Amino acid sequence: MDGRERELIEKLEKEKGLSESEYAELIARRDEEAASLLAKKARRVADAVYGDAIYTRGLIEISSICRNNCLYCGIRKDNNLTERYRLSKEQILSCADEGYDLGFRTFVLQGGEDPFFSDEVLCDIITDIKKAHPDCAVTLSMGERSFESYQALFDAGAERYLLRHETADATHYAMLHPSDMSFEKRMQCLRDLKKIGYQVGCGFMVGSPGQTAETIAKDLTFIRIFKPEMCGIGPFIPHHNTPFKDEKQGTLELTLFLLSVIRLTHPWVLLPATTALGTIHPQGREKGILAGANVVMPNLSPVEVRKKYELYDNKICTGEESAQCRSCLEDRMKAIGYRTVVDRGDANHGKI
Ligand code: 5AD
Ligand code: FES
């Protein structure tokens, strides 16, 4: 680490952000020493805001059917070698019940863009989850929808929405997606969600094909300005039946570095140590927490469908029961001096 790198890290800490070109410079110059200094500062900030609490969210993967063809994704429409599934309303409600009994107070319903989940169908499910568990937060991660649709789901009781922006560079976005998807539309969806009043999560993959220090600097600038409540980042991992099957996987090192940068940019942000991070390294999620993350998302999907929700190869947690997944993460957090908490876990804006 040279003097300039140290200067950039100190500025990032003090001013909670850098200019786009400074973010790019910080990334291009990074080395082990810089990463460890950054992680130390990021962890100190996360400790100040959230203490030793790591929030848990129960993830329910409700459908692997998707009308889109994102080039990186294992459940893209053109992957005809994967078996598709869709959970029934009863299955979703029973996952939520099981999760509730395990202590979860936030459920994330995630799925491909499956046309079956019309507003009517989804609103009905959200209403019933809220009726059964009024003290729980419902988060949706169901892709791009219209303003009216997001509004209807919000009115039914969904309060959070995760929609990764994937990349804040329009040209890069076009490399990752087919021509019928647009960067503008994605950004519009994110603005709509915010306008309606959702707590919004954006995010991107680390090491996706075509990504550079400059595109990441754009992501960080977007995150700085957009101020999402949550930010999901994890390494890109190739899936064997996608156009990106021969591309390189994102690194643990860069993912951890960026987790720290994002924590310093938004001290209060909810930052998950993702399943993808746990997939590329046996202690990936623990390292993510130590670099500044403060959320984990154990899988509550029925075990018989888990293997089928394979966005990338070798995904972990596909054989374990919900209870096992929960206690596995609890133990892992305990081993590094943190404790998982099960309350709603809203972003702690007030603290810093
Ligand atoms: N590797 C890592 N993450 C992926 N996602 C989709 N495919 C992959 C992959 N091959 C991420 C995307 C999406 C989120 C649900 O999963 O960023 O938004
Ligand atoms: Fe799912 Fe360890 S967290 S099995």
Image: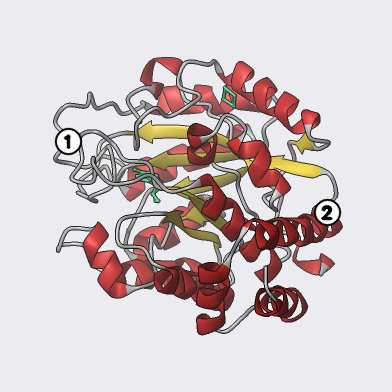
For the residues marked 2 and 1, what is the alpha-carbon distance in whole angstroms? 42 Å
Neighbour tally class for label 1: few under 14, some 14-19, many 20 plus, Cα within 10 Å: some
Dividing the image into 4 quarters, which one contains the C terminus? bottom right
SS for tag 2? helix
In percent of width and height, residue 130 lies at: 58, 40
Name the residue nearer the viewer: 87 or 216. Answer: 216
Q: Is residue 155 left or right of residue 5?
A: left
Report the residue at 50% width, 27% height from top: 93
Report the residue at 60% width, 52% height from top: 256
Name the residue nearer the viewer: 318 or 149. Answer: 318
In percent of width and height, residue 349 lies at: 75, 66
Task: Identify the mark nearer the N-term, 2 or 1.
Answer: 2
Report the residue at 81% width, 53% height from top: 50
Q: Which residue is mark 2?
A: 47
Query: In this picture, is 176 found above or below 93?
Result: below
Q: Which residue is mark 1?
A: 79
Q: Disc number at residue 280?
A: none
Q: Amino acid at mark 1?
A: Asn
- What count of labels does the image hold? 2
In percent of width and height, residue 14 lies at: 77, 79
